[in-house]
Amino acid sequence: MARRTADQTRRLILDAALQLLLERGASAGVQHIRLQEVLRAVGLTSGAAYRIWADQDEFHRDLAVETMGLRFDVPTASATAAVDEALAGGGGLDDVVRAGARDHVEYAAQFHLRPQSRDAHVFVTALALRTAAGAWPELRAAAAARHEESIDAFSQFYAEMLERFGRRMRTPFTIRDLAEALAALGEGFAVRAAEGLEHPVVVVGDDDESYPGEWTLFGIAIRGLVDTFTIGDEEAAPAAGPSPADRSR
């Protein structure tokens, strides 16, 4: 049998470590994934690992970076499915916002309610690692790359939704501003969900002229931001004045 290269051995060990992390979740970043345990799982000796990493800290750094880049689907996959279902049912803007927000809340809660969910574990684990990224430059770079990938994907997603419902960005905001604001809100609520905290629900009365109905707190916050950051096409159109012929009369 051909002998593994150092890169192949590194990949084998990191894949096994990622599997353990997905099974156990983010207990304390990635520090609870011990190198010796991973080596036993793949049938390797300490010598094989320490030819790649000088110590446990270096291994944890690489594992954190690998986790940051791990995705099982495109960033917008879950939101797109929820919104498509709302649209298929003839939903309007409020329905789409409700559906997308509810999907995010339930998705993040999977970390607590369904520990076996790989997607939820990676999302929340990466979120936790981003808060400690200052320790390692490599992790900061990986965190920035993950964030950019998500913002780019959601910027396109939101742009398509705005066009569909006849809205455009209000000066001086950009679609990226909207995506960044919603990402910050969504990540904050995701942390709450990972802690097992129940997401607040708000019921707006039918006599209210704003957004009547039942909303998740995240959903009603999104709806308010949409009105703050965007403007309807009819609002943007200049008011029609009298025609030149009328003015000459």
Image: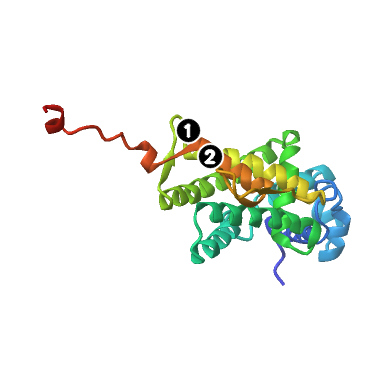
Q: Which residue is mark 1?
A: 173
The circle on residue 31 is: none
Residue at 72%, 37% in the rendered image: 133
At label 2, the amino acid type is Leu
Q: Hey, which quadrant is residue 55 in on the image?
A: top right
Classify the position of the N terminus by image quarter. bottom right
Residue at 60%, 54% in the rendered image: 98
Q: Nearer the viewer, residue 166 or 43?
A: 166
Measured as percent of width and height from the top left, residue 28 is found at 84, 46
- Left or right, 240 with reference to 170: left
Q: Nearer the viewer, residue 46 or 230?
A: 230
Question: CA–CA distance between discs 2 and 1?
Answer: 8 Å
Q: Which residue is mark 2?
A: 178
Residue at 33%, 37% in the rendered image: 237
Classify the position of the C terminus by image quarter. top left
Measured as percent of width and height from the top left, residue 134 is found at 73, 33
Evaluate if marks 2 and 1 touch, with contact meaning CB atoms under 8 Å apart: yes
Measured as percent of width and height from the top left, residue 198 is found at 79, 51
Mark 1 crowdedness (10 Å alpha carbons): few <14, some 14-19, many ≥20: few
The relative height of residue 156 versus residue 44 in the rendered view (above or below) is above
- Furthest residue in direction bottom, as rendered: 1
Q: Hey, which quadrant is residue 114 in on the image?
A: bottom right
Question: In this rendering, does residue 174 appear at all?
Answer: yes
- Left or right, 110 with reference to 31: left
Q: Could you say whether the residue bearing mark 1 is in a helix, strand or loop?
A: loop
